[in-house]
């Protein structure tokens, strides 16, 4: 999704009010990305703040409005990778609490946690392409730009990722999930088809 050209130009001049408007439109996405890339909700909140702070300080490095989401996602990947290294010990402690739902709006908490568990079982490459395409609703070309890979590679990874996700979902939840299919929406493309009782991954976000 392209950033509004006027906001982009204003941010390039250091306009803090314009940047606050950008933050309002992207903070939820950065939080989602951080969770889907493996952070817990409190960690994802910290990551989102760090990502947006870095983006503001480095805004001059963003090439063009249409490249903004790709550039922001690359920052998110780096911040999340650093945070995962810092908190890895917490993940193996026997007293670790179970994951908690991270999103206020969307599917029921058990559906959200099941989706995240299935994504965690995929390879990082498959999970990323599935998240960006089927959760966030980016096009194949947009996903290719965000990940720095050819569109054909996106298509092949996505095909394998959907197959792997479907198998994981059927193993964890053999009964069709109770998702309100008529109301689920991607952020731009409308409802996505559902196959074989697996959940539609997209859900509404503010």
Image: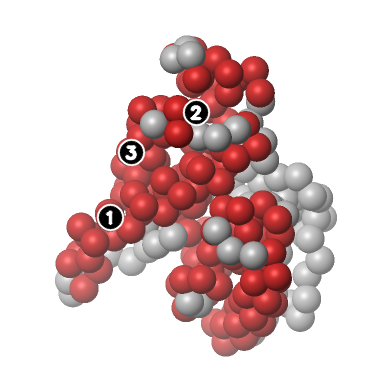
Residue at x-position 40% and y-position 62%: 38
Q: Nearer the viewer, residue 72 or 45?
A: 72
Q: CA distance from mark 3 to mark 1?
A: 11 Å
Which residue matches tag 3? 50
Residue at x-position 48% and y-position 59%: 36
Dot 3 and dot 1 residues touching (CB under 8 Å): no
Residue at x-position 51% and y-position 19%: 11
Which residue matches tag 2? 23
- Residue 137 in the figure: left or right of residue 54: right
Can see residue 110?
no
Q: Residues within 10 Å of mark 2 (few under 14, many from 20)?
A: some
- Residue 16 in the figure: left or right of residue 184: left
Choose mark 1 or mark 2, whichever is in front: 1
Above or below 55: residue 33: below
- Residue 48 in the figure: left or right of residue 122: left
Query: Residue 54: x percent and y percent?
Result: 35, 35
Q: Earlier in the sequence, mark 2 or mark 3?
A: 2
Q: CA distance from mark 1 to mark 2?
A: 22 Å
All told, the count of numbered labels is: 3
Which residue matches tag 1? 82
Q: Nearer the viewer, residue 205 or 13?
A: 13
Query: Residue 104: x percent and y percent?
Result: 52, 45
The local secondary structure at tag 1 comes to: helix
Above or below 34: residue 123: below
Q: Residues within 10 Å of mark 1 (few under 14, many from 20)?
A: few
Can see residue 42?
yes
The local secondary structure at tag 3 comes to: helix
The local secondary structure at tag 2 comes to: helix
Above or below 64: residue 43: below
Residue at x-position 58% and y-position 18%: 9
């Amino acid at each position: 999704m392209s950033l509004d050209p006027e906001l982009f130009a204003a941010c390039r001049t250091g306009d803090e009010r314009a940047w606050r408007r950008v933050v309002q439109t992207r903070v939820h996405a950065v939080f989602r990305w951080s969770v889907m890339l493996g952070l817990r909700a409190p960690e994802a909140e910290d990551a989102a703040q760090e990502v947006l702070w870095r983006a503001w300080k480095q805004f001059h490095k963003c090439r063009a409005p249409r490249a903004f989401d790709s550039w922001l996602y690359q920052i998110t990947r780096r911040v999340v990778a650093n945070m995962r290294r810092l908190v890895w010990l917490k993940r193996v402690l026997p007293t670790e609490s179970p994951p908690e739902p991270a999103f206020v709006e969307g599917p029921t908490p058990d559906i959200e946690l099941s989706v995240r568990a299935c994504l965690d079982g995929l390879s990082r490459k498959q999970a990323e392409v599935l998240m960006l395409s089927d959760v966030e609703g980016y096009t194949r070309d947009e996903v290719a730009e965000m990940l720095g890979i050819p569109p054909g590679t996106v298509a092949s990874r996505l095909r394998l990722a959907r197959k792997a996700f479907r198998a994981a979902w059927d193993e964890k939840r053999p009964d069709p999930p109770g998702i309100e299919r008529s109301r689920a929406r991607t952020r731009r493309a409308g409802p996505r088809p559902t196959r074989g009782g697996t959940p539609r991954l997209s859900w509404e976000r503010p």
